[in-house]
Image (cartoon, rainbow, N blue to C red):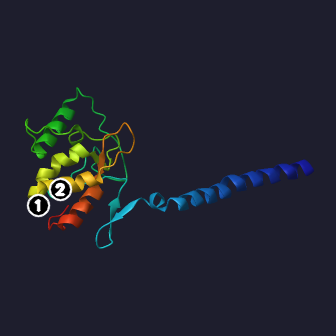
Amino acid sequence: MTSTFKLVSACLLGTLLLTAAYVVALLGVAALVPDAAHGSLLVDAEGRVVGSRLVAQRFESPTYVWPRPSAVDHAADRSGGSNLAPSNPALRERVVAELARLAADAEHPVPLELVLASGSGLDPHVTLAGALWQAPRIATARDVDRREVEERLRSLARVPNPWSPPLVNVLEANLELDASFGTPDIAR
């Protein structure tokens, strides 16, 4: 009876430590990084939550920086790449359609990430080159100087690691454009 009691006690103690104590420890760590633990939410000038800095969302208005194309239509409840091989005609059709949407021409080559979806379909960043490529369109649509738009975009560029090009968070950039030049009357 004593060995059974010891065995049951050890199982209960182990269960308690591996469930309750573990959860409390995780919540404690989350309290140390509250922004990430609560979804890294961003708010607009009126204090409304407009999205997360971790998940891409669609912007179609010419007044905004556009994100990478998404194989999952920027739906935050799922992720995934297109899984189309370079030899697949559907990939070529998608790239041609994106080039047409971007009004690309041979004189101004489009950065690759603006025509190809990311692996997750939810990448919230474009390269600084991709953001700057869009600056003339944004400046024209907002009726501001292109150099001012470029300056705002450059100020937001971050290099997350030594092997990465400078990246711009699309939602943060669009909030900065609204703060600097006013919110356009056009829907996102």
Residue sticking out furthest to the top: 87
Q: Residues within 10 Å of mark 2 (few under 14, many from 20)?
A: many
| 157 relative to 6 in the view: left or right | left
Q: How many marks?
A: 2
Read off the residue under disc 1: 144
Q: Secondary structure at mark 2?
A: helix
Residue nearest the observer in this picture, 82 or 47: 47
Question: In this orientation, does residue 79 appear?
Answer: yes
- Residue at figure coordinates x 74%, y 51% from the top left: 14
Q: Position of residue 67 (x, y in %)?
A: 24, 49
Residue closer to the observer: 103 or 12: 103
Say if mark 2 contacts mark 1, CB within 8 Å. Answer: yes
Look at 27% across and 41% down and name the residue there.
117
Looking at the image, which residue sits at the far right?
A: 1
Can you tell which mark lies on residue 51?
A: none
Q: Nearer the viewer, residue 78 or 68?
A: 68
Q: CA distance from mark 2 to mark 1?
A: 8 Å
Which numbered disc flags the more N-terminal residue, 2 or 1? 1
How dense is the environment of label 1, judged by Cα within 10 Å: few (below 14), some, or many (20 and up)?
A: few
Mark 2 highlights which residue? 149
Q: Residue 166: where, in percent of width, then height?
A: 30, 44
Does residue 105 lie above or below 42 as drawn? Answer: above
Horizontal side of 143 relative to 40 (left or right) equals left
**Identity, as a three-letter code, of the amino acid under mark 1:** Val
Q: Amino acid at mark 2?
A: Val
Where does the C terminus fall, quadrant-wise?
A: bottom left
Helix, strand or loop at label 1? It is loop
**Figure check: 52 above or below 80:** below
Q: Residue at x 8, y 56 (%)?
A: 140
**Residue 175 at what x, y percent from top left?**
26, 62
